[in-house]
Amino acid sequence: MVAGKILLITASPRRRGDYINHLPPLGILYLAAYLEQNGFFVDVVDENITELDIASAGNYRLIGLSINVANIENSISLVRRIHNLYPRLPLVIGGPLPTTLPEFFFSWPVEAIFISEAEESFLGYLTRKDPAQARGYYLKDPSGGAWNFRGPAPYMEELDRLPFPALQKVPLDRYYTPVKRRVPVASLISSRGCPFSCTFCSKTLGSKFRARSAENVVREIEWQAKVLGVREIAIYDDNFTLDAKRTEAICDLLIEKNIKVSLQLTNGVRADTMHRRLIFKMKDAGFWMIAFAPESGSEITLKRLKKALDLKRVEECVIWCREAGIKTWAFFMVGFPWEDRRMLRQTIGVARRIRSEITHFSNFTLLPGSELYQKACQGRQGWKLQDVNLFSSRRRIAARSYAAVYLTDPLKVVNLFSVLSLKDLFAIIWYAVRNRNLV
């Protein structure tokens, strides 16, 4: 490889208006920090916030793109534009979609396709004399165009070895989420991997829960607050509370160090990992919002999703949060192939009964890599070159679910004022109208 900088890019969705929430892309920011820790120079462009100057692409030795189900259209457009302008510039890709459907990208003008977490495999690709012998990525044979793959790389077990994500490389003051207490808001991930077997999930980071130590997590929170000026952090773990002792230790350190930062858990936690004492301690540590993910109110659907969850425990946790002064957010999915009207009514009934401040309905989507996707496609290619928005409710079923919860309960609407500023509430209403969430 020639000397020079590396550029990492996250393309935006083609329909940017379908998304109201934009927070830093931790995947490529972790990769940037890890590569710089090992002697490389890296720039980052998040096209949700900053447009790439395509003419500047020729200044880099290599360009990598992170691709997911929401940004595939602009990703392929960007790859083609860069390749047409600089045909000899190496391009590589990674992210959730290349991890689950690597063969989908074999015809793209890229040199390597990275799967799952890529810190160590990307470094190996850059430093090994024979990259074809490394694991964790597909490598295109320059002579014949065949793809070589020597298997997945082992997952990093000691996540404390990772440097903090390179948040200083993106303009934090330009990110936006309507659900917040203070600005600027940044994001954090304290663990990887999920031991549960939900059939709708692709689990691109493996089945083993791997967590950073409480001390390491709190050091990053302190760094974000004191060095970067972050005033609120959205924690995007899949399983932040899986190890309750670790969660308590994080809270204890935040209280001991008197770190004044607002914290929200907006990716959804399992109610069966929570207890009343922990919730009250989280409040003392700075948590003001906790999201729960019941997914459905139908026991039949929960069984097919392999979501072993007691819905009464969700209700109980929401009550504890209300007692502690923590706001709550509940996630549901609708539109399953097997779902009938009775099941949908059950989901709406549970959504009403839980009485969280925010209730979110998303359309069920077959995610590549998930058990449901594999069963539905049965070896066929079931994915098209088209962005998928997991949050917009352009199908009537989700829009009607919102109406059934919000428009029949005036108190539900009033409670939004306890979570959102007037400006942010109007932004959400406009977003809901534009995306047909309430019609």
Image (cartoon, rainbow, N blue to C red):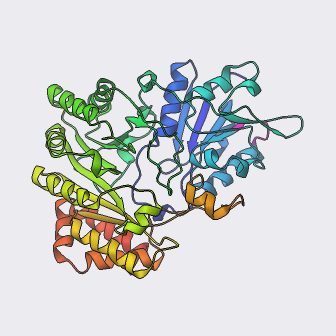
What residue sits 47% from the left and 43% below the top? 25
Q: Does the magenta stretch include residue 410?
A: no
Using the rendered view, name the quadrant where residue 138 is placed.
top right
Q: Main secondary structure of the magenta part?
A: loop
Image-based side of 269 in relation to 371, left or right: left
Give percent across and percent down for residue 278. 18, 41
Residue 69 on image: x %, y %:
57, 56
Image position of 423 with respect to 338: above or below: above
Q: In which quarter of the image is the N terminus?
A: top right
Q: At 44% across and 42% down in the image, what residue appears?
A: 195
Count the marks: 0
Q: With respect to residue 307, does 147 lie above or below? A: above
Q: Is residue 265 left or right of residue 125?
A: left
Horizontal side of 193 relative to 102 (left or right) equals left
Q: Which residue is rendered at x = 28% and y = 69% of the image?
A: 350
Give the quadrant of residue 430.
bottom left
56 to 135, vertically: above or below: below
Give the residue drawn at x 41%, y 41%: 171
Query: Residue 139, position in %: x, y?
Result: 75, 35
**The magenta stretch spans which residues?**
86-91
Q: Using the image as rendered, state which of residue 337 and residue 185 is in the foreground.
A: 337
Residue found at the very far left of the displayed protein: 323
Visible in this render: residue 384? no
Residue 134 visible: yes
x then y, percent, for residue 148: 78, 35
- Quadrant where the C terminus sits is bottom left
